[in-house]
Amino acid sequence: MRRLDTNALQMFVAVAQCLNFRQAAEQLHMTQPPLSRAVRQMEERLGVQLFERDTQHVALTPAAAELLPRALRILALLDEAEQALQTRQPAARLRLGMTSSMETDLYRAFTDGVSAELGSGAGAALDTVFDASPRLVARLRARRLDAAIIALPTKTFELPVLQLGKQPTLVALSSRHPLAKRRSLALADLRDQPVYWFERARQPAFFDHSHAVFRKHGFAPRFLLEPHDHHVLLSDVAAGKGMALLPASFAAVSRSGVSYRKLKEGDELAAGLGLIVAEGHPAAALLRRLASATLG
């Protein structure tokens, strides 16, 4: 049984290049504790210490210095193999990611336009995937996507972002709740209500931005962990288990027992949309034009 795999090598290289576990975890779109555990387990499997670490610094051991160039060569060979296979795909094939934090109907005009444009070529195809924005960024940087629509703010590293439109935040609540009788609500109105909210790991930058707005307005309700599936979330809202703060695109989703109300601070909590495209991709101009026209 091999004591090394590509996942372990990627984590090792990230720490070795950053010499900082927190920064390496951000680069890998994970939190620091599981990264530290994974490195310790890797050291135990190999029977060598890879990093000298204390509260002040991280340094490579002689074993790590010997492993690093080999790990970089292995990962480079894997990238080369993936690129070689990609050249065999139809020229018009496009792998497109879209942030799962928005309602899917928001993308319909954009994806229809892309499909129509690609459809004019032989063997054209559009592959779509929905995921959290940080994971979409990671997939694109690993060349597993050609382009992605992400929620902003999100850390994109070296990838340039075309900023598109913004989605103000609204309140989703049970139609039977007394607050549903109002035409609009403020964060102060929700202070004593249970509110569904996502965990920071799903969207760290937007999570931090939102909580800065919450602190500004003294908003500290009892937060409930938001289900990943939006249908489950809206079902819980309809049942009166809690309220949800959602992008305005969700207002298009008609769900029995759920009412949507404008939020006074909705613009402060607005999530932006951005387009990122793999460097040099032949469809870059097309994607920018369609995204600006349909999502701008």
Image (tube, rainbow, N blue to C red):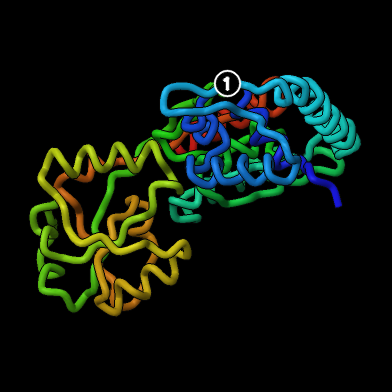
Residue 62's place in the image compared with 49, above or below, is above
Which residue is painted at 61% across and 42% down in the image?
Answer: 40
Front in this rendered view, residue 274 or 26: 26
| Residue 239 coordinates in the image, percent (x, y) | 29, 79
Indicate the quadrant where residue 35 lies: top right
Please rate how many residues cluster around mark 1, counting C-alpha atoms within 10 Å: few if below 14, some from 14 to 19, many from 20.
Answer: some
Residue 135's place in the image compared with 275, above or below, is below
The C terminus sits in image quarter:
top left
Q: Give the side of residue 155 with respect to residue 242, left or right.
A: right
Check disc 1 and report the residue beneath it.
59
| Residue 111 coordinates in the image, percent (x, y) | 60, 46
Which residue is painted at 39% across and 47% down in the image?
Answer: 200
Q: How many marks?
A: 1
| Residue 97 coordinates in the image, percent (x, y) | 60, 44
Front in this rendered view, residue 285 or 171: 171
Front in this rendered view, residue 233 or 21: 21
Residue 180's place in the image compared with 202, above or below, is below
Which residue is painted at 39% across and 34% down in the image?
Answer: 153
| Residue 32 coordinates in the image, percent (x, y) | 48, 40
Q: Give the side of residue 40 with respect to residue 182, left or right.
A: right
**Could you tell me which secondary element the residue under label 1 belongs to?**
strand
Front in this rendered view, residue 128 or 116: 128
Residue 86's place in the image compared with 279, above or below, is below
Indicate the quadrant where residue 82 lies: top right
Q: Give the side of residue 138 with respect to residue 212, left or right.
A: right
**What amino acid is at disc 1?**
Ala
Which residue is painted at 38% across and 36% down in the image?
Answer: 205
